[in-house]
């Protein structure tokens, strides 16, 4: 009974916050509603036993992506008049995308109803119930160990390449000499002047 109430609560808040993400006039409010939707979706994942996906939703999407969106939106100077000007022009394309997404949802729901036989066949092969994170770790570090290590190596090479490209020496840029800045005396940096009235400063 409690699980059913929790499901309806999480589902209702998720749908409501998702709708408010679309219809909120303030972009900052939209991002905040998006964070709320992510949290409630993580609660739904916990109810179905997918705790790894719930952690990914909270750590990756809420902790990184949504906060990044929030900072970017807060730094932008959004012109709402220009956003509203192209609404009627792009309305047919938006309706087409909505119809396609609705068809995908209907197809996915009809495919989900035809899946109990596959679920029973999959559960019959398992000898004992294994938590999702443990099963994922067993598969990741046994069968898929080589692709996992190769993916980590590719990410390491990409990170090193980004650092090298950022810190390469350029002729059109002045480098920073920290020892020279630290060893500079105040009398070399500040020059006291007493200009006459109307004389101004000489550069």
Image (cartoon, rainbow, N blue to C red):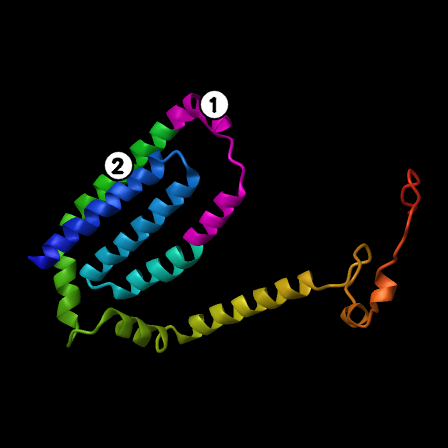
Residue 73 shown left or right of residue 36 in the figure? right
Identify the image quadrant of residue 57: bottom left
Name the residue that disc number 1 marks.
Answer: 85
Q: Secondary structure at mark 1?
A: helix
Specify the segment rendered in magenta: 66-93
Residue at x 16% of width, y 53% of height = 7
In the image, which is nearer the foreground, mark 2 or mark 1? Answer: 1
In percent of width and height, residue 39 lies at 30, 55
Judge by depth and name the residue closer to the eye, 113 or 175.
175
Q: Residues within 10 Å of mark 1 (few under 14, many from 20)?
A: few
Residue 173 visible somewhere in the drawing:
yes
Residue at x 35% of width, y 78% of height = 142
Residue 123 shown left or right of residue 55 in the figure? left
Compared with residue 129, is residue 3 higher up or lower down, i.e. above or below?
Answer: above
Q: Secondary structure at mark 2?
A: helix
Judge by depth and name the residue closer to the eye, 185 or 21.
185
Name the residue that disc number 2 marks.
Answer: 103
Quadrant containing the N terminus is bottom left
Does the magenta stretch mainly form a helix, a strand or a loop?
Answer: helix
Residue at x 22% of width, y 72% of height = 131
Q: Is residue 79 magenta?
A: yes
Residue at x 86% of width, y 65% of height = 187
Q: Is residue 78 magenta?
A: yes
């Amino acid at each position: 009974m409690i699980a059913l109430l929790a499901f309806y609560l999480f589902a209702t808040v998720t749908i409501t916050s998702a709708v408010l993400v679309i219809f909120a006039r303030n972009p900052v409010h939209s991002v905040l509603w998006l964070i709320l939707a992510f949290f409630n979706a993580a609660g739904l994942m916990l109810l179905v036993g997918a705790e790894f996906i719930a952690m990914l939703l909270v750590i990756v999407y809420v902790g990184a992506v949504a906060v990044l969106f929030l900072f970017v939106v807060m730094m932008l100077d959004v012109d709402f008049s220009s956003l509203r000007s192209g609404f009627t022009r792009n309305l047919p394309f938006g309706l087409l995308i909505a119809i396609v997404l609705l068809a995908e949802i209907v197809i996915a729901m009809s495919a989900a109803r035809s899946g109990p036989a596959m679920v029973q066949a999959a559960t019959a092969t398992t000898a004992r119930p294994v938590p999702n994170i443990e099963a994922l770790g067993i598969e990741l570090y046994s069968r898929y160990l080589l692709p996992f290590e190769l993916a980590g190596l590719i990410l390491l090479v990409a990170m090193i390449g980004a650092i090298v490209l950022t810190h390469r020496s350029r002729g059109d840029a002045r480098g920073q000499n920290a020892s020279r800045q630290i060893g500079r005396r105040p009398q070399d940096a500040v020059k006291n002047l007493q200009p006459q009235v109307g004389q101004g400063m000489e550069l």
